[in-house]
Image (tube, grey):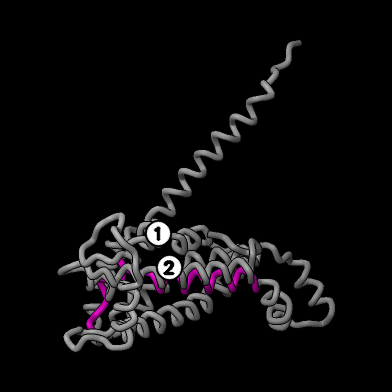
Amino acid sequence: MSTLRIPATMPGRLGRVTSLLATIVLFLAALPILTLITMSFGNSDTLEFPPQSLSLRWYHAAWHTFVSPDAGDALSMGTALTTSLIIAVSTMLIATAVSVPAAYALSRYRFRGKAIVEQLVALPLVYPLVMLGLSLLLVFNVLPTDLGVLRLIIAHVILALPFTVKNCAASVASVGAEFEEAAFVMGASPHRALLDVVLPLMRPGILAGMLFAFIISFNEFTVTFFLYSINTMTLPVWLYSRTVSSLDPTVFSFAVVIVMVDFALIWLLEKLVGDKGVAI
């Protein structure tokens, strides 16, 4: 009986090819960010890549725009940033409050329609954002009252729920039912066992879901573009408004700061949670 022999050089070649492909993919993924950072240090009044000279000119202009907004601007950058933070924090808290009991029920109980509920939770991941924004706009327009910033919060919660529910469910799945049974044996009520045993063990998934919800809400543009008003303009929409008539190079500086904030949040997620309970 003959055996198949693999040349000893094949793993090395395969490893080099795989490493090369991974490097190319990672470079292409990072290329927009690298271009953004490079353009933010340009010194020209016009957009040219690569910049002929480098300076902090547009960072100084961005800082001046932040601290001393132009009188002609319909909305200041500080107001847009405040609105984005209010919406992102509200989305984070509401999505987490909904996701924790939902993830526990989906993981612990069997009920009719469970598969449909799981599919509905994941639906925003595949739903076209343009159609989602348009649909929500039509729904909110028929309501007898203007919800203001609340309609943006509702839309962002819908977009964040798949991430918060999945991360919380991953944590619940790692907590075996025997932990609750042990608490029952020790005399704890079901409510007490949930608060004192299950929730602390769900901490990695809850934290991961909260940070994902904040990042998703803070950077969301497509759906927000259909629902914002001049009084509820978020930071991404404000940045877009600076590029409609003519591309203001200061948006590159603002965008770099936003990317750095996102990187800091992802780093914080890695330090607080690691790979425990993170389910993207």
Q: Is residue 108 left or right of residue 255?
A: right
Q: CA distance from mark 1 to mark 2?
A: 8 Å
The relative height of residue 29 versus residue 266 in the rendered view (above or below) is above
Q: Position of residue 162 (x, y in %)?
A: 48, 64
The relative height of residue 139 versus residue 230 in the rendered view (above or below) is above
Helix, strand or loop at mark 1: helix
Q: Position of residue 14 (x, y in %)?
A: 59, 31
> Can you name the residue that lies furthest to the right here?
186
Q: Residue at x 32, y 67 (%)?
A: 252
Helix, strand or loop at mark 2: helix
Q: Magenta span has 223?
A: yes
Q: Which residue is mark 2?
A: 259
The magenta-colored residue range is: 203-231
* Amino acid at circle 2: Val
Q: Which residue is mark 1?
A: 33
Q: Main secondary structure of the magenta part?
A: helix
Q: Quadrant of the N terminus?
A: top right
Which of the two labelled residues, at mark 1 and mark 2, occupies the earlier sequence position? 1
The relative height of residue 58 versus residue 126 in the rendered view (above or below) is below
Q: Is residue 145 visible?
A: yes
Mark 2 neighbour class, 10 Å CA radius: few under 14, some 14 to 19, many 20 or more: some
